[in-house]
Amino acid sequence: MAEPERVIGIDLGTTNSCVAIVMNGAVHVIPDEMGAKIQASMVSFLADGSVVVGNEARHEQIVDPLNTIYSAKRLIGRHYSSREIKTASQSFPYKIVKGKNNVPLVEVRGERYGLPEISGMVLRRMKDIAERYLGGTVTKAVVTVPANFSDTQRQMTKLAGQLAGLDVIRVINEPTAAALAYGYGRGLKATIAIYDFGGGTFDITVLQIRDQVFEVVSTAGDTYLGGDDFDTRLARYMLHAFKHQHGLALEGDAFAFSRLKHVAEKVKCELSSKSRAVVNISELGVDEKGNHLDLKFQIDRDDFSERCQDIVQRTFLVCDDALSQAGMRADSVDGVVLVGGTTRMPLVRHMVTEYFGREASTDINPDEVVAIGAAIQGAALEQDHFAPGGSRRPAPLLLDVTPMSLGVQTVSGYYDVLIHRNTSIPCENSRTFTTGIEDQTSVRLQVYQGESRVAAENIKLGEVELYGLRAAPRGQVEIEVTFEIDTDGLLIVSAKDRETGVAQAAHIEVSAGYTAEEIALMLERGV
Amino acid sequence: METKKPTGTLPTLGKVALKKIAAPAVTSAPVLVRRVVVAEADDIVRNALLASLPRDRFQIFAFADGDAAFEHIGQSGADVVVLAKELPGVKGTVLSELLRNGRSGKALAIVLMSPEYAVTALGARDCAAFGADEFLPLPTTPDALLERIDHALVRREPIERLKALPAQLARQLDELFLTLDGLSYYELLEVGLEAESDEIQLAFHTRSLAYHPDRHQKLRRTLPHAWEKVSTVFKRFNEAYQVLSTPADRQAYNLGLRRRKALRFESEQVRRGADRDLDIAGTSDGRDLVLRAVESRALGDLDGSREALMEALKLEPSNTRISDQIDAIDKLLMIVKLQERQA
């Protein structure tokens, strides 16, 4: 019998990544050669020209922050001029530069890399881990993204997979994957909330599960809210403490701040199990006489909690939004699932329990749950060999939604929504456009994603140009443009002349995207 | 094989009685050569069309008038017909309708041609009303002609015949695909007008398990055309579910269904109207209020709409376009009250 095609599920996280697979009906989270099931989503470029990825790169980050790329997921698929890139440029030690077509690039040791290339290196590492474990090649993968990723971010994630030599058969939303890991095979009939607080993003998703059907009712998120925010908060406090101890300000010292953030993360984790943390950081700064100055720092859990409460509070504003979209209240959900390392914090657990009025389920590892769900979905899409436990259990079906409204700019600069957020996918909507002047040969449409009434305040996906229109008096050519969102959550645009029914030539220019040539070049180079 | 019985008495047309007409035989897989019937009165145009059709793919039968074409199809059958709108004898449009409603009309691919952009010309939209699958404006090119024919053939090719899906599912899919535009959301999901949200969800889930494109990944790789049909049908189920599970949308949809027999939800028009109307306000708060007014009005809540407009007027007291809107609503309210009194 021919070897069945294997599909791995990869959770490509902001901070950490994880890979899993369904084999013989059971889900395996795949460890690396050191036995680690979680890899840091980091890539470090060493002085000798070699590149290390994963947990090995994490060590490099402490000694060489300028040449170690982390949190690439925060940057992928964004416009160089976006708020996110600006914030990152200020707080990240490595260099972010502007490429062609408003694409952000990272510059390391004189070389420039696209973010899909960096993420591709992480995916390549996950692929290698799986291949070593399985003892054979793996070509297909399901990769997860935050629910509120835009079309461009999804496209770029897919490209990253391609660069890593993977056929990404599906991009699924992290919370949906978590729901699958939580509810598959349990015969549930329930409404659950997935509270996903990761390293760099926060998502909340409300789902209804009826046996094998998983229907997402609503989703909402904040792509700039995560565990990193706690680390930064704590690192800043440490800087403050250092200044208090030595009278020396270290603001602007990237190296010192990077060390502090690293320590802050450790302190944060320590405070999850202990009520008090004490650290000694040697040689953090140098005074004017050339003396090395150390930082002695201690903090108790209550103090830390008090300083970070507002960060957790911000997640509930997002929850309120998702619940109201679903027409529900916090106390009407039947279960709460916690996803992401940040949900390990006692402060988060405590506040979540209070918000939902019930204890969250803790029986799955929040670091692995997303990869597990991705693996299950991968197996479901390759139904032929989806036979968990020997018996052919029915494969699960995900009914997901699009996280952001999609629309076009009107003449007056407003935003005309074609597909509303939280519409179940795949779906489509058509709109008719006409010519404004005599014998006009082309029409350009500006396509956006977002919720603002004013088009320019949303994320610009690109421009659709309908060209080669037939010559006719103004207003006589009616072009029906169909916007479809497919099962990957990706946009597909098609157009036809309403009068003749002939398909209309359309050209799509993606903003903050790569040209076909650039992509070809990247693919040739690989990662 | 087609087993449907002829229904009712059939009208006669000229010398040819429809009863005598045999069904256009349904082709059986694998089909390499398709029988195409071309009906066009103009010799030059007809010959040009014939020259465009590759002989290795088509067995061609050409006619200069409608009656002859009709008779031929009745006796010998066809896989695809290409008809001019105007023909001596029975007109192309009438012929299209007759063939479609004939015994094997379901499997027949029909392309209607018409001179481009003439005043009396047909549009793509009118063609569907005559039962045609595709519209071809003249003059045309060989590529365009073949594209139309192929589109029509794919559209009419029953998935059941491809044996790629369970027979019952394939039959249902073929039926749904061709009748999609004639079904209301309630008919699509097979639920009553008063169905509760739980029942609607269950109906949608059951259909999702059968029709969701994810359930047919193999089809996607092997028969992309068939997979497209599955996706088209699923997207319509999804549309129906979205509208029927959102109370405000469902209410508006019911209204359109009752009053205008609108089978699909026309939120687009409502929103487009909203966008136009929004421009009547000068401030952003004003626009929000006008939007609320437009939405309330679309849902039949005239009082709510008036209230929102009044608030907008408070923000922009000298905006006559807002006060005009209020006057218009007042008139509507008066009419409604009069009607209530009469009732």
Image (cartoon, rainbow, N blue to C red):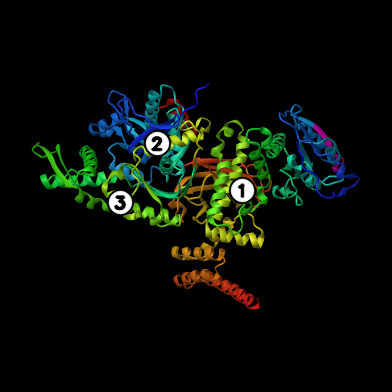
At a point 65% along the width and 39% down the height, the residue shown is: B168
Residue B16 rendering spot, x and y as whole percentages: 89, 44
Residue B54, position in %: x, y?
Answer: 74, 29
The correct choice, above or below, for A66 with respect to B95 in the image is above
- Is residue B134 rendered to the left or right of residue B234? right
In this rendering, which labeled residue sits more in front, label 1 or label 2?
2
Q: Which mark is residue A371?
A: 2
Q: Which residue is mark 1?
A: A480
Q: Quadrant of the C terminus of chain A?
A: top left
SS at badge 3: helix
Could you say where residue A384 lies in the image, as x and y percent from the top left?
A: 53, 31
Q: Amino acid at mark 1?
A: Glu
Disc 3/disc 2 C-alpha distance (Å): 25 Å
The residue that label 3 is drawn on is A312
| SS at circle 2 | helix
Residue at the image position 91 percent from the left and 45 percent from the top: B15
Query: Was residue A349 drawn as part of the magenta stretch in this picture?
Result: no
Query: Label 1 is found on which chain of the structure?
Result: A
